[in-house]
Each structure stands twice: as C-alpha cells, then as structure tokens.
Image (spheres, helix red, strand yellow):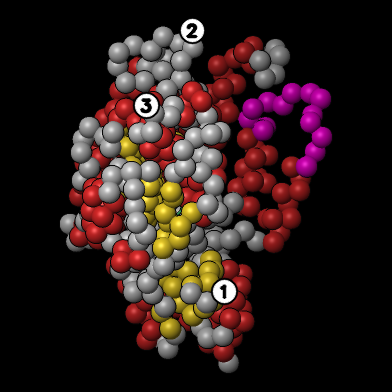
Amino acid sequence: MSVGSRAEGTDGIVEAVQAAEERARIYLEAIGQRQVYPTSGALAAVTQFREPFPNSPSRAVDVIRMLDEIGSPATVATTGGRYFGFVIGGTLPGSLAASRLVATWDQNCAFRVMSPVVAEIEEVVVRWVCEIFGLPLDCEGGIVTCATAANFTALTAARNALLARSAWKAADDGLFGAPPIDVIVGEEVHASVLKALSIAGLGQKRVTIVPADSQGRMRADKLPKLKKNSLVCIQAGNVNTGSFDPAAEICRWAHDNEAWVHVDGAFGLWAAASPKYRRLVSGFEQADSWATDAHKWPNVNYDCGIVLVRDPQALRQAMTISAEYLKPGLLREPANQTPEASRRARTVELWAGLKSLGKQGLAELIERTCAHAQRFASGLREAGYEVLNDVIINQVLVSFGASEITNEVMRRVQEDGTCWCGGTVWQGKTAMRISVSSWATTGADVKESLAAIIRIARQVRG
Ligand SMILES: Cc1ncc(COP(=O)(O)O)c(C=O)c1O
C-alpha cells in the first residue's frame, strides 16, 4: 500500500483523525495548567521542524505525532483563560467543534454550486451580524480572513462607488488618471486601515489626519470640509483604550456633504450585542461600510473577518468575478462579496459560534469580559499603579512608573507565565495592555493574574 495516497485507505484517515482528536483533547484539558507563553525549551525544540523536504512519505498518524510532540508545547495558550495580549479571543466550543466537521467536509465555498449548504449558511449569518450591529438587514456582507482584509474590501467598494459618481469605472479602468478621493482618518487610526488604504491604491500617507482626544476619539469638531469624493474612516473600539469615535456627529456631517463613512470596528462593534454597552455604538449604524472580526471578541476560532456594506451593489460591483466557466445563478454567490474566490468554510464556524451563544450568550460574553477588565483596573489602582485609560469596555492600559520600569514589569510578567500581556505607548507613556477578550477567562483567572502582576511589579519597584 502506498503511504499518503488514497491506497492508504479509509483506515489510515480514521486512525490519523482519531489520533489528532485524542491529542487535541489532551491539549484542551491541559491548557489551564500550563504556562501561557511557551518555555524556552519548547521554543528551542521547534528547530526540529527544520529538515529538508523528505524524500519518502510518512504515515499521516506519524506526521500528527511529530506536530503534537514538538508543536503543541510551543503554542501560545491563547485558548486558556489567562491570555490578555493584543485583542485575541479564545475559541468557543461550538466554533471549535464545527471546525472539525468543516475540515472534514472540505468545502470550497466560492460558489453556491460548489457548496449549497455553506452558501445558505453564509446568507443567514450575514443577516445575523447585521441584526447584532443594528444595521439594515439588506446590507451585503462577505466573510474574509481578518479585519485588515475586511477593511480592504470595504475601502475598495467605497473607492469604486465614489469614483463612479464622477463616471469613472475603477474596476475596468484602474486608478491611473482617476479623479482624486479625499481620505480622512483619525489620529488614532489602526495600522490595519492604513495598510488597507495602501493596498486599495488610496495611499496611506495621502490622508488628512483629524486630531484625537485624550481617549483616542476623533475630534468631530476638527473634521475638514467634506465633499462627495470624501472617504471618512472612523473607529469603533480603539485598540489601546477601547474608545469609540463620535459616530453620529461624524456621519451626519459626512452625509450632509455626500461623503462615504467607513467603520473599522474590529472588536468594538460587538458592544452592540449587550443592552448594557449598546449605547457606545450608537450612530455607527449610520455609516456606509463596516469591517469587523469574529475571531476577536465573539471568540470564533481563527480566522474570521466580516465586511458589511450598506449598498449591496457597491460591494458586488467591486468584488464580482466573472469567467466563461463560472456561471453564477440568480442567488447570492459568496465569491462576489470577497476578494477571494476559493476559500474554506469559516462561515460555518461563525454560524456555529453565534448559534451556540444566542443573543443572551453573546451579551453575557461581552459584559463578563468588560467586568473582568474593571476588576483588573480597580485591582491595579488599589495597588498604587496608574490606569491610563477610561476603562469603558475590555481594554486596560497600566503604567508602573517610568518606561524602563513598565517594560521590565511586562518582561517579567511574560516570563513568569501565569498570564500574558503586551505593551504599547499611549500618548507618550509606556503602558502594559490588558485585553480581556476570551470567553474562557474566569474570575479566578483574573484574580490569579492580578496577583502575579502586582507581585512582579512590587519586586521590580523594590
Ligand atoms: C481597531 C482594529 N482594527 C483592525 C485590527 C486588525 O485586525 P486583524 O489582525 O484581524 O486584521 C485590529 C486588531 O487588533 C484592531 O484592534
């Protein structure tokens, strides 16, 4: 029997999948006990992957053994409850379990004919997300890899729609010689939007920057004159402070002047799911396009970004693919909403995560993580450290004193392994960032992590 070929047989597949399942089970059970960042020994071991491309095949079960034995200890325990770096969600049981089935289905969900079931589920889940954010249900949306891809997709749709107002067909004629588009961003714009502007041909430096206030919110009173070729990029959830731009005011001013408003709401838009926090996203529903991530606050497994556009035609005109052998039907075709054609069915993992939570579960997840962030902030303040931001959602910025001290505390926190937090510089001040984004974080995780951070800070400060 030839290893790695179909002749290896169904038994070989079943054996390998069962082995992977068993190893995954052990990984999941141990995640709460292990140190969050891999040990130096585990990191050193990954060099064992550096081998020449092998001449002979290996049995799938042996490949999985190597992957688990060397790879698993070197992973960062982001699915445990004590990872607070960047803005990284864990993985909900519903999404994780669905990903197993989805991998087995191995559907290409570019076109309905390739996977009718995924195309159907995608239509449903796009509506659900619109409902959660309070957007019109006839907005069009696509499921992409991440917020950067969602920003790129939305900005491309915006670009083409704005140019079409001057009778310029960007999809046909490109950008050389096109009328200009005035792009406006806040001082605290996320790097993802700048990258998206750059790859959409709009330029990341060719922008007007509007000053921000002490929490990073765009100053609506400092907006420049807007016109029907203006593209205003606003933010729901600053990556450092969690703050929200004053969307209602900006959208009113922009729309009075026929400008397009795009929202980068990578995580912040999900505050809309909670009756307690919904007021923070009031006004964002008036924008023209939105980018968000399900792999952040909603805890769908990686990778899962979502783009939404108010005018369905604007998204479709920018993303539609046509070729003789692709004969789309009259129904919605997934590939006509995204830059990708062939892609895996991450849509199903999104659907499974949201279905398993329901409105109530999603609201509880948002509110619980915000409450944990409050607990971190009050514990750190009580211990004498400065919390630099108004903790309005799940983001906390803490300074332990001078830059060198804060950096040293952070280095030791990361080395200690109880929890993991990253760093930033907020308005000139070095800070440690605590982002509580995981469904798996419990009150006990917060208590243990807080105790470790305070213990280490006291050691450093002497
Ligand atoms: C506000 C904001 N926008 C965009 C991004 C980029 O997200 P992704 O890495 O999924 O592209 C982030 C990531 O943290 C973010 O916080």
Disc on res. 325: 2
Whether residue 408 sits left or right of residue 349 in the image: it is right
Residue at 68 percent of width and 39 percent of height: 66
Depth check, front residue: 26 or 428: 428
* Label 3 close to label 1 by CB (< 8 Å): no
Q: Nearer the viewer, residue 74 or 3?
A: 74
Residue 197 visible in the displayed image = yes
* Residue most extreme to the left: 275
Amino acid type, mark 1: Met
Please report contact status of discs 3 and 2: CB closer than 8 Å, yes or no.
no
Q: Which residue is mark 3?
A: 316
What is the residue that sits farthest to the top in this orientation?
A: 324
Q: Please tell me whether residue 153 is drawn above or below residue 392 in the rendered image.
A: above
Q: Secondary structure at mark 3?
A: helix
The crowding category of the residue bearing disc 1, from other C-alpha atoms within 10 Å (few below 14, some 14 to 19, many at least 20), is: many
* Front residue (pair 38, 124): 124
Q: Is residue 25 above or below residue 237?
A: above
Q: Which mark is residue 410?
A: 1
Which secondary structure is most common in the magenta stretch?
Answer: loop
Task: Residue 316: give x, y in percent of width and height.
Answer: 37, 26
Kind of residue sitting beneath label 3: Arg
